[in-house]
């Protein structure tokens, strides 16, 4: 057992100024270590940044100013424990692919709400730019006057950094989507480069699949599973039966 302040990284970009007992494990990824704390586990790389894959790990919390239906308020991820959460990172307001994604997810917000899922859009724009974008007519590149979920302002880029999708040189986020369980664990993520948008129907399919397996112990969802289709037991015999009948 070591103290965190005793771990020396010669090229670390940040310094540690507190002590916490930890165990350090080498991982298969070059430059990546796993540090186990009393309160849980944390992945970080040798330069002090976040690990690129957060799946199966606690979602980084945040407190961000947001805009929703005429109101400015602060939102925390931890305030939504007990609900599924989709975080929809996108590069910038008033751009090209972004409004198509943001509006398509807005159209699906009612369906997501029925599935006990809250969606948030996040970009590095200010809350006031979010408001201006929502209020602008669609024919002028805006969202047409309304949106069915909050847009959060990651103005200092910390959330994009914590989720491993910040483009450092450009100062904007990649198109990252993160599905977070009611317990605050990242269950699924997808990250696109800037030129291709994401699929609302696929996000809902994956949400339903994880909701199914979370409430059906021992069951798993095969490839391209849709709500109402066959699942399989997570054992060799059920796998063989499924493959033989499909």
Image (cartoon, grey):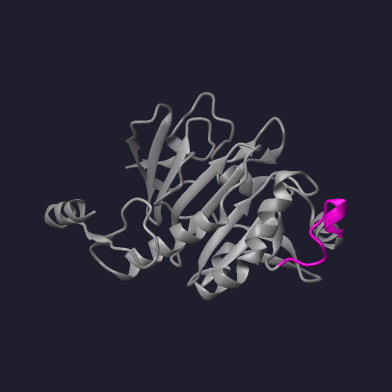
Q: Position of residue 121 (x, y in %)?
A: 66, 57
Nearer-the-camera pick, 40 or 64: 64
* Left or right, 57 with reference to 48: left
Nearer-the-camera pick, 77 or 2: 77
Q: Main secondary structure of the magenta part?
A: loop
Q: Residue furthest top?
A: 10
Q: Quadrant of residue 79?
A: bottom right
Report the quarter where the N terminus lies. Answer: top left
Q: Position of residue 240 (x, y in %)?
A: 15, 52
Give above or below for 109 relative to 190: below
* Left or right, 133 with reference to 16: right
Q: Is residue 145 magenta?
A: yes
Q: Residue at x 78, y 67 (%)?
A: 146
Q: Residue furthest front?
A: 245
Q: Residue at x 57, y 56 (%)?
A: 200
Nearer-the-camera pick, 154 or 131: 131
Q: Position of residue 15 (x, y in %)?
A: 57, 36
Q: Quadrant of residue 31?
A: top left
Q: Which residues are magenta?
A: 136-147
Residue 17 visible somewhere in the drawing: no
Residue 213 visible somewhere in the drawing: yes
Q: Is residue 174 magenta?
A: no
Q: How many marks?
A: 0
């Amino acid at each position: 057992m070591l103290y965190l302040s005793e771990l020396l990284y010669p090229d670390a970009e940040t310094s540690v100024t507190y002590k916490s007992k930890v165990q350090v494990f080498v991982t298969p990824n070059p430059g990546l270590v796993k540090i186990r704390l009393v309160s849980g586990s944390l992945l970080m790389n040798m330069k002090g940044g976040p690990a690129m894959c957060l799946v199966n790990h606690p979602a980084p919390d945040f407190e961000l100013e947001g805009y929703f239906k005429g109101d400015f308020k602060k939102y925390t991820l931890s305030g939504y424990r007990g609900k599924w959460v989709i975080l929809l990172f996108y590069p910038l307001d008033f751009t090209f692919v972004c409004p198509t994604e943001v509006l398509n997810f807005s159209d699906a917000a009612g369906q997501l709400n029925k599935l006990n899922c809250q969606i948030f859009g996040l970009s590095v724009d200010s809350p006031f730019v979010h408001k201006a974008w929502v209020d602008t007519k669609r024919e002028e590149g805006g969202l047409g006057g309304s949106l069915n979920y909050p847009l959060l302002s990651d103005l200092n880029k910390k959330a994009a950094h914590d989720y491993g999708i910040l483009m450092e040189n450009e100062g904007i986020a990649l198109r990252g989507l993160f599905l977070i369980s009611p317990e605050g664990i990242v269950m699924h993520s997808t990250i696109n480069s800037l030129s291709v948008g994401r699929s609302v129907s696929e996000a809902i399919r994956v949400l339903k699949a994880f909701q199914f397996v979370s409430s059906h112990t021992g069951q798993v969802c095969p490839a391209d599973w849709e709500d109402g289709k066959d699942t399989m037991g997570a054992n060799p015999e059920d796998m063989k039966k499924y493959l033989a009948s499909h």
